[in-house]
Image: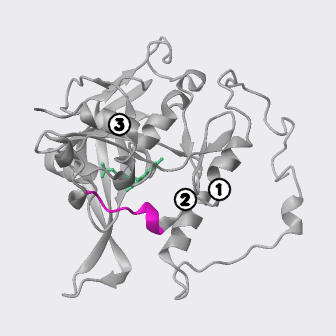
Amino acid sequence: MAFSQITNLHVEAFDKEALVQRNPHAEFPAVEASRPDYDPSKFWEYSKTPKPNWKPGSGSICDAWKSHTLIAIDPDSPNRTQNQNYKLMISSTVPRPIALVSTVSREGVHNLAPFSYFNTVSVDPPLYSVSFVGTEANDSLTNVLDSGECCISIVSDWFLEAANMTSVNTPPHVSEWPLSGLHPVHSHMVKPPHVGESAFSIECHVHSTIPIYSQREVHDDGRKVRTATMVLFRAVMYHVRDDAINDRMETVDIGVLRPVWRGGGITYGSCFGGWETERPKAFRHLVEQEDVKAVLNQLQVS
Ligand SMILES: Cc1cc2nc3c(=O)[nH]c(=O)nc-3n(C[C@H](O)[C@H](O)[C@H](O)COP(=O)(O)O)c2cc1C
């Protein structure tokens, strides 16, 4: 594939970020520069509970809530935008774990993207949910529905930036793997590889899908507008790092996993603190960068 084909912007995925405007800072690089460096030496530590001598019926340990009022917000109010509801929801339902979802397209393109509408659902069968949002299916959802499979890798702090890069809106024929610099590892039961850097990955088959429709919008022909698709995935194989699992092969050590969570705006957190990370620039801007050109040039097949 020639460089001009890789960077063919006519097929670039929709740049949702331009609409959402999730970065609250006018000059984020200056804000970031004013903050202390990330401290990788911080580690997970257990303490006592906030009030070890808490007695049944004694409620909260702090009365600060009494000096505040609760503001009622109606999500269906006519003058409230979807973006307001989105920002409210993602900043209050926190922390959310991040699934790095690996899929393969019909054409054989290896796709990788992060999703934080992600959680466990049940043990028998071992199900996980991922919600893919947008009126148009993103590449991950298209591939999941076409192939019936994916790999989910849990994101840890040592590859947060690389995971964030995979959210770039590349066209369907451009893989995010080389842009991230992450390493694909062969899976046992499914075609998509899992992320070598991740301490915990799950090979998955699609269990079922649940379409979600807009309450506000309909197509011109009266059909409901689909705004999201929730997919339930069944785990068919786990991969866990040898130093992260106990002898009984049951419990993953959070101190080794060092999971990263997603908050509102551009906020991310670990178990030790938080930071902000901007989304990657739209693909059309990214392809202007020399470092990105160098990566994409390596994909050329003469
Ligand atoms: C940390 C993080 C979490 C995200 N969570 C979701 C999510 O839960 N659902 C979703 O549809 N998009 C989510 N996104 C956006 C997608 O990753 C993004 O739209 C990406 O371009 C989709 O890639 P694809 O077209 O290759 O599937 C998230 C992005 C980031 C950085």
The residue shown at (16%, 44%) is 105
Q: Residue 253 in the image: x percent, y percent?
A: 55, 22
> Which part of the image, by quadrant, shows the N terminus?
top left
Q: Circle 1 sits on which residue?
A: 27
**CA gap, disc 2 to disc 3?**
26 Å
Report the span colored magenta: 12-19
**CA gap, disc 1 to disc 2?**
22 Å
Instruction: Name the side, left or right, on which 143 lies relative to 118.
Output: left
Which of 84 and 148 lies nearest the eye of the viewer?
84
Q: Circle 2 sits on which residue?
A: 90
Identify residue type, mark 2: Ile
Q: Residue 174 in the image: x percent, y percent?
A: 23, 44
The residue shown at (66%, 41%) is 274
Q: Residue 187 in the image: x percent, y percent?
A: 24, 25
Q: Is residue 207 above or below residue 39?
A: below
Q: What element carries label 3?
A: helix
Q: Circle 3 sits on which residue?
A: 179
Q: Is mark 1 on a helix, strand or loop?
A: loop
Magenta run includes residue 17: yes
The first of marks 1 and 2 along the sequence is 1
The residue shown at (55%, 59%) is 90
Q: Is disc 2 surrounded by few (<14), some (14 to 19) or many (20+) residues within 10 Å? A: some
